[in-house]
Image (cartoon, helix red, strand yellow):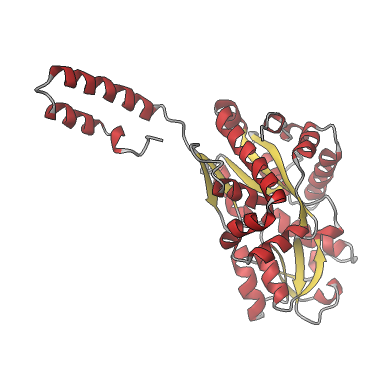
């Protein structure tokens, strides 16, 4: 990309012309070349900024980058502490797409009509958990206790669904709003007796002796992570967004066939060992390309039914501003054109 190159500086070409003014032929050649280069600078495709946070299901994007699949493309992966910051960045126009949970996609869709779900990244099947102090036997032990929960729809959704199964509600506990970066410290310092968490924090707390009280395998199919893009970006930059999705599925294929090398590439970014990363993958299921085509194309209606049910549940629990019809959000255009 020439955008940030010195060659895009008009002064550079003017100074070069002055230095070569004694030669008419060379001067004309420089003028012509400069005109062409400057034109390419002004028409260079803008970066495709994709937000993501540290969650095993999103790491195939970073694996694709590590493997060079995004070389010679304007694709930029932007790290965020959590999905909350991604939602804010999307609304502020700081990113064109994001890897976020389905509930966050619904929250965005309630206020942004341009949201399109273009990849089903994973189904959480044990990756999202509630862990408590050693010695706690079940969720009933949380009555009246402080519980750390990220202030997102997903955090509220998980704690609500978990407590429902025990005939409880969030009113039975003391909710402490905590960002993901605060989970481990707050738990170890005793600020909270339990925390709703995931990813590397889950791995570290369990290794330190925390007791797992609930996990997302107990609500199968309800927690989904997706890749969203702005509709106008899909229409204006089809080659770039296709390269993004192609690279992601190539990386998923690489992870399946070469798990050890993939884990070595991914683990340093996530702050866990390669072995711990591979272990964390057991808590989720990543649909392959044929499954994505069926889910997003609605020939397999299970995703549409699940998201519709989730949307209503979120609305009932005041986690959503207004009702959202999930059908227009599911977009199979890019997965249908993937070339591995």
Q: How many marks?
A: 0
Left or right of 23 in this view: 154: right
Left or right of 55 in this view: 41: left
Q: Which sits in the foreground, 266 or 320?
A: 266
> Which quarter of the figure has residue 297?
top right
Q: Which residue is at a point 77% across and 40% down the rendered structure image?
A: 323
Q: Which sits in the foreground, 298 or 314?
A: 298
Residue 279, compared with residue 305, is above or below; it is below
Visible in this render: residue 269?
yes
> Which quarter of the figure has residue 237?
top right
| Image quarter (top left, top right, bottom left or bottom right) of the C terminus | top right
Visible in this render: residue 325?
no
The image position of residue 213, as x and y in percent, is 82, 70
> Which quarter of the figure has residue 339?
top right
The image position of residue 82, as x and y in percent, is 61, 56
Left or right of 235 in this view: 136: right
The image position of residue 302, as x and y in percent, is 86, 40
The image position of residue 281, as x and y in percent, is 73, 58
């Amino acid at each position: 990309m020439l955008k940030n190159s010195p060659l895009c500086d008009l002064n550079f070409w003017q100074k070069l012309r002055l230095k070569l003014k004694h030669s008419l032929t060379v001067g004309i050649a420089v003028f012509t070349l400069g005109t062409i280069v400057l034109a390419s600078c002004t028409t260079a495709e803008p970066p495709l900024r994709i937000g993501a946070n540290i969650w095993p299901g999103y790491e195939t994007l970073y694996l694709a980058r590590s493997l060079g699949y995004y070389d010679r493309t304007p694709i930029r992966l932007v790290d965020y502490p959590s999905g909350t910051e991604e939602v804010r960045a999307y609304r502020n126009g700081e990113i064109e797409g994001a890897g976020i949970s389905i509930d966050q996609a619904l929250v965005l869709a309630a206020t942004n009509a341009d949201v399109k779900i273009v990849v089903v990244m994973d189904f959480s099947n044990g990756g999202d958990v509630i862990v408590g102090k050693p010695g706690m036997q079940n969720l009933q032990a949380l009555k009246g206790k402080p519980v750390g929960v990220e202030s997102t729809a997903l955090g509220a959704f998980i704690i609500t669904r978990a407590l429902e199964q025990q005939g409880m509600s969030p009113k039975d506990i003391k909710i402490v709003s905590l960002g993901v970066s605060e989970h481990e410290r707050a738990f170890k310092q005793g600020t909270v007796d339990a925390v709703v968490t995931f990813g590397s924090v889950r791995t570290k707390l369990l290794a330190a002796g925390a007791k797992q009280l609930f996990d997302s395998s107990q609500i199968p199919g309800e927690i989904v992570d997706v890749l969203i893009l702005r509709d106008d970006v899909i229409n204006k930059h089809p080659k770039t967004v296709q390269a993004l999705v192609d690279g992601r599925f190539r990386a998923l294929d690489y992870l399946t066939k070469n798990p050890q090398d993939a884990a070595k590439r991914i683990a340093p970014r996530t702050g866990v060992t390669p072995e711990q990363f591979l272990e964390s993958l057991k808590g989720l299921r990543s649909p392959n390309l044929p499954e994505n085509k069926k889910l997003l194309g609605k020939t397999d209606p299970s995703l549409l039914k699940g998201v519709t049910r989730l949307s209503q549940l979120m609305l009932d629990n005041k986690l959503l501003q207004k009702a959202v019809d999930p059908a227009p959000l599911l977009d199979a255009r890019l997965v249908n054109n993937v070339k591995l």
